[in-house]
Structure formats: C-alpha cells, structure tokens
Image (spheres, rainbow, N blue to C red):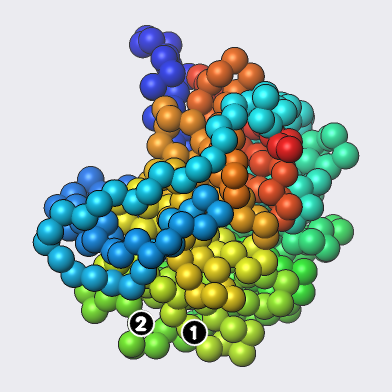
Amino acid sequence: MRSTEVYDEETAGADLRRLMLTTDVPAGRADLARAIADGQRANRRRLATLTAAAAGIAVLATAGGFAVLGPDRATDAPQPALPSPSVSVSTAPAGCKLARLPEPDGGGAEVSAMDPSGTVLGGIAHDRPVLWKDGRAELLEGVQGGVYDIAADGAVLGNDEATGGWVWREGQVTHLAKLTGYQAMYPSAINAKGQVAGYATGRTLDDAVPVLWSADGKAHKLSTPSGIGAADVQYAMARDIDDDGLVVGDVRGAPVYWTPDGVAHALPKAGRADMIVWAIAGDNVYGVASGDFAVRWSLSTKQVFQLPKGGDFGAKAGSANGFAVLPGNLPETSHRVGPGRDDELRGPNGEPAMALVISNDGRTVAGLVATAEPYSVIWTCS
C-alpha cells in the first residue's frame, strides 16, 4: 500500500487492473491480456484500423439482446452503430447479492477460479493455492502457486513458476509435462476427464503453440492449420476445454475450436479484427475482438454476437445459458450480461470491481473489489 500519496478509486482501479494482468490470475489468460494491453499502447494505429474494420461488418439482425454480426465486409464509408440491446439494468445488491469471501490463515487471498457449479472457488494467497468450499478458505498442501481452474469432479488446476503446472485431486498431485522444444508451459483450464488445455512458449509469446495435456500429464501439441488466421501473426493458444474434450482458443488472431480428435475448425470472425477466445460453456464460446469488442459465439449455428458492453478483456467468462462476465476497464466496474439482463457488479459500498469467473448456470460470479487492499467477493444473482 502507498504511504505518501492519495489512494483514490482511480488509483486502486489501476492497481487492480495491473494485478489482473500479472501472474496472480491464470497465466494462460493473464499473459495474453498483458500482451494485448502492451500492444494497444505500442501499436494504437494498427488497432484503430482493426477496430474500424470490425465496425464495418454488416448488421443482419438482433436476437436475445445481442447484435448478430455478419461476414467480413471491407469499406471506407462510415457505418451505422450497432443497435443498442434491449436489457434491464440492475446494480448489486438489487440485481446480485454480494458476499465477501473468508480469508485463509495469513489473509491476502485473491480469487481466480470456480468450478462449474459455483460452489467451489480457487485462488492464491502469498504464492499458496487456496480453495473456498463450504464457507471456509483452506490452503492446499503439497503445491505452490495459484489456482487456474476447478473441474466438475473437484480436480484443481494450478501452476508454480518454479516447477510448472499441476493437477491436485484429493491430495494427489499430477505434474504436467513440458512440451518438447518449448521453455514455458501455461495450463489454463481442466475438464472432468482430467484433460488440460493451455499453451507453451519459447522465448516470447509470439512463439506460443496450443497444448492439450492428457489426464496422465503428457503434453500434446494441437494443430494450427496454415489457412487459419493472419499471415503477420504467429502465436496460437488454447484457453478452455469442456467435459467432452472440445478445446477453444485462437490461431494467429482467428477464433478456433478443436474437436476431441484434435482437428481445428475456424469460428466466424467479426470483420477483420484480431480475436481472442477465452471460454466455452455448453453451446456458447466467449471472447473479445480488437478495440474493446466483447463477443459470444454459438457453436451450433456458427454465429457470432456482439455483447452490449466492452472492455479490454471483452467477455472473460460465460455460462451455458448465455450469461457473460465482462470485467471492463477499471475504474469502470464489471457487468454480468445475458438475455434480458445487465447486472452491474460492485463492492459493498459501490466500489468498482473486477469480475473474473462465473458458474455454468450464470447465477454465481466471483472477483475482486478495487480498494487499496483488493479483496475477493462472490455475487449471487437471480
């Protein structure tokens, strides 16, 4: 905490945003987000061009509070703004009830993960993994680092900067192998079968390749077909996996999903914007396009929908029934948006907050409140 300057809401928000962009949040998501933020500052002109291209897509229809986006359409003519969705806006505690998560011994816990049911949460406290369950916070034994994801069967995925990725299941630990030829591994998500999705890097993030770890901890490189993505982009990353083994991520700036047999398939893009895929839940895939453009895809219809809010991270997480968590850009607060709803997520005294994870039914959200000492909270929504 600062001792010589005024610690106002904007300063706290900036610190919490930096917190999200560093290792205390799942590295498979945080490292890329940090790269995005750096890229936005260093290369604004390129992003402005990409954003303009994204704004030039055809608006075909609106459905369920989302704008449906069409295929690429190159034009220099000004385009009409996408229609505003028809949603009801509510703020916590009216829309979502807020509760502070208990602290483990030593305090300082930061939530970063949730199981699909929303009953078990994970995070980090002083470089120790912590679980919240049955109203209690407990430090995991035998592992270090933070919790990145929690599977439906209770398996916990984490990463230790010194020793690498690990899976903790009822006290038994499986260490994730390194992919041959790559220096660093960044596991991101785990499913009920024990499969883990993530990525591996060489010297830089540009060298990143998508990885699937099998339940025994062995690493397998996923395919990155040459016909997908932009020629001037190199990296490819996997970031989430469902219980059927379907993996989502992006290849050279293009959104993709990998079927359980390892075959990559492109998802539709929103104009020419580079896109990042964060999460999958049921038929829904969630992510962001360059220029603060949050999106949701439908796997069954292969459509992409623009969400009514934005932010650098776009739709960071989402539920099977179409609710998305939008962290926003602090000091602006986060939102939970879905069919007919827009819930503003704040701290107990109206402080801005950064929501990070959501349950599969969309009713439970967890994140951090942006105060001088950020703390973990959970929102229960109707």
Q: Dot 2: what SS?
A: loop
Q: How many marks?
A: 2
Q: Earlier in the sequence, mark 2 or mark 1?
A: 2
Numbered circle sitting on residue 73: none
Whole-number angstrom distance, CA of label 2 to CA of label 1: 9 Å
- Where 356 falls versus 105 (above or below)? below
| Residue type at the position of mark 1 | Ala
Q: Is residue 1 visible?
A: yes
Residue under pointer 1: 264
Q: Position of residue 285 (x, y in %)?
A: 55, 64
- Where 320 falls versus 363 (above or below)? below
Residue found at the far left of this picture: 76
Front in this rendered view, residue 304 or 285: 304
Numbered circle sitting on residue 228: 2
- Where 211 falls versus 87 (above or below)? below
Q: Residue at x 67, y 57 (%)?
A: 321
Front in this rendered view, residue 67 or 6: 67
Q: Residues within 10 Å of mark 2 (few under 14, many from 20)?
A: some
Q: Residue at x 55, y 32 (%)?
A: 89
